[in-house]
Image (cartoon, coloured by chain):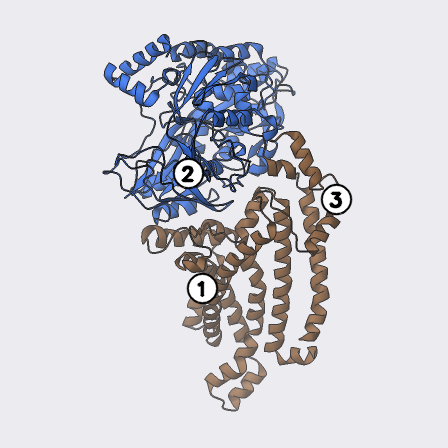
Amino acid sequence: MAAHDYQILLERMLRSGLTRRSLLRRSAGVIGATALAGISGLAYPPSWVAAQTAPAGPPKRGGTLRYANTDPLKPLTDPATVDSLGASDCVRFVADFLTHVDEKNLPHPYLLESLDASPDLKTWTLVLRQGPTFNTPTPRPIDSDDVIFNFKRWLDPKLGTSMTGLLTPYLDETGIEKVDSRTVRLNLKAPTNTLPYDLYHYAGAIVPREFEGDFLKQPWGTGPFELVEYVAGEKFTVKARKNYWRQGADGQPLPYLDQVISIDVKSQSPAYVAGLVSDQFDVALGIDYSAYRTLKEQHPDIVLSKVRSAGTLLFRAHVDTKPFDDERVRLALKLCQDRKQIMELALADTAFEGTDDYVAPEVDPAWYPLDPPKQDLERARSLLAEAGHPNGFETEMQYPAAPEFIATASQVYAQQAKQIGVNIKLVPMPADAYWAKWTDWTFCAPYWSHRPLATMTLGLALRSGAAWNESHYADKKFDALLDEATGTVSVDDRRNVYSRLQPYLREHGPFAEPLFNYALAGQTKRVQNFKPTAFRYGIFTDTWIE
Amino acid sequence: MRAILTKRVPFLLLTLFVSSVLIFVATEILPVDVARNMLGQFAPQEAVDALNERLGMDKSPLERYLRWLGRVATGDFGESTSLRSPVGPLIIKHAINSGILAGAALLLIMPIALLLGIVAGLYPNKFADRVISLSSLTATSTPEFVVGVLLLLVFAVKLRVLPGSSALVVERTALETPSKLVLPVLTLAIVDIGYVARMMRASMIEVMRSAYVRAAKLRGVPFHRVVIKHALRSALLTPVTVVMLHINWLVGGIVVTETIFAYPGLGQLMLTAANARDVALLEAGALFFAIVAVLSQVGADILYIWLNPRARMNSA
């Protein structure tokens, strides 16, 4: 535990009203790695979940929980290659992760007992917890060889996992070092503060080193449930494992539930609204705005949650294609946004204003408090005139037809752009067709899902040459600012970097950002102790039903 | 019967062939990278290229069509790219679900619609006819999604007497929990009963005005015997034929109803396939619908001949 990290933790805990004793208890029992708390910070009060009920009484054991999965249950083979939340939920029941990010976006060690970083954030030490065992045909405890096996898989570009893009900027295979049977050291080629979050990425489940690549044939992990069946496009069922390593409040192994069934409801709100109301489902995750509004206005018996997230809609352009190669044109396309109007028509109170800089206010703890940019049509017109487009120009913009709010926001934005002479011809596309070529569109409306730290999204989307750099943005000054932010452990220091990074992106970045959205979920009152997160993961290890 | 089959089988084969060409051409137009769809967006390009080669995607469209036709002829419909499982069993499983829904809907639609149509047709422009005609027209002109959502609101949300979702949670088929069929069947029935009833009414009015019915009445045959013995069989010709042609719609075209109630039928499967640009599944599904369409056409012909002695004479 580095002294300065401890000081940061101490400062934050005390600021949030904890005593030194409770701090010590927490740092030993929950946080384990002070670096995690330092990175995440506690700068904001825990008001992330707008509606949540406290458990009605002591936990009860048994029963089946059924939940509507609005994300498709895509075919599942390898946990490392899942690319949908629905399929990743199934893996998460069976296989644990090294870390856990809670409903307040705070990272905790999970399969790890501790995760410590050196002061320069280039050496990370991972110590495994004692107790978790794999449900392999011959059950055995997890050890550091398993962790190394997974890291090597994640770094192998041939596997095709999204973990590769997250880890390779700062780690290669030579940097993985086995210290002993429970300890692994990562010697990074570049400093990072995102490791605890990256290890919680949905493709980062830990499988045993005997795993050969087909999860349906070898559904092995240290998780609280065992796989019963997985039917792509329809449902999956898991049943409780008898000897999970975590214990419930009653001293018995978790989970409390006997069984969980997830149903693919194809994002159809009538199905899950009616299913929730008529007790067909206990929980619906990732519900859309219209369902949220219906449930809120007409069904007070359904418990709704609204979690502030960094999920964001963009209108982005290729910076190497005319006329978007001119920074003035891109800035004009940002300045024409009337965010309040876009939000009001697209998502109303389930969105909050975008910033044109990817940093979600009060989500990323290091957010530097800047007001959202205001509409400035006059400046936008004069920028266009300076760029040689005094009468504006015409362009096409592709957008995915689902979810619906993207279509609405795109239509409102096109109307607003008309005011500065930019005539946007909207090209709606089936969502799958859109996402199949999402980096190819010159001007389009992508949605980026929630990542707790803005540096995570910025590293994927805007760093020069990054795998998902869909705008072809390459800016050395921005890269340097991002490197500085990514290599900073203290939230206050990172905020300091953000105070330069945010204004820079607002002026020079390749996208307009009208809104961030809340992650919405609904549950019946019989569901107890379920904590929805901005990730929209279905995690029911500590949940019970009345 | 043999004559019908002799006439219809070549027609069936020709229809299937033309359908297969059209389906293949239509799916060729879709800009799909099949291997990329299967392996995901993070898969290395080499793996994608290798799979495309293994699947024969690097061959000319004609070559691929012939290979596809050859495989289909042996019962191999390929693998679904979106669900990564063999297409044949997927189609069968969802067709069984749709068949159950369609069968239940037909069992409800036919007796009610025919009875209403007969009553309306026997007493044209009387009170009963006006009530039946007006409600039939209203029901027919209300779209499925409105009827479905209204039924959901009343029975699942307000009264809470029926399940709001017909997704199969632990059941293999909906027959294990018949209550899950009630709302989708009612939705289909409300939309369709009006249509069939109006057709039956028109047919009944026409038959009741025909010369042989008038002659029977003049001979003093009791009214109920005139209706049952003389009029009904002829009056059934048109609605029954039309209902047979409806089978295709009930099996594969009820996308809206299946979607509202999250019922895992063929319509929903095809919607998923179209959204995911799952060519193999779309091709097999469309071919299945073509087969159902042709078979129900043959069934309609047989039924028509059975009901109509004149047609039976001509086909003999």
Position of the N terminus of chain A by quadrant: top left
Q: What residue type is labelled 3?
A: Pro
SS for callout 3: helix
- Front: mark 1 or 2: 2
Which one is earlier in the sequence, the residue at label 3 or at label 1?
3
Q: Which amino acid does label 1 sit on?
A: Leu
* Chain colored blue: A
Please tell me which residue lies in front, A471 or A535. A535
Marks 3 and 1: CB-CB under 8 Å? no
Residue A356 visible in the current orientation: no
Q: Is residue A190 left or right of residue A525?
A: right
Position of the C terminus of chain A by quadrant: top left
Q: In the rendered image of this protein, does residue A168 appear above or below residue A133?
A: above
Q: Mark 1 points at which residue?
A: B134
Q: Name the residue under label 3.
A: B61
Q: From mark 2 to mark 3, how far is it between C-alphas?
A: 42 Å
Q: From mark 3 to mark 1, how far is it between C-alphas?
A: 53 Å
Residue at image point 61% right, 38% down = B37
Task: Return the x and y of residue A231 as percentages of the image width and height.
Answer: 50, 46
Task: Indicate the chain on which mark 3 is placed.
Answer: B
- Front: mark 3 or 1: 3
Task: Return the x and y of residue A347 as percentages of the image width and height.
Answer: 43, 33
SS for callout 1: helix
Q: In the rendered image of this protein, does residue B22 appear above or below residue A536?
A: below
Q: Which amino acid does label 2 sit on?
A: Ile
Q: Mark 2 points at which residue?
A: A287
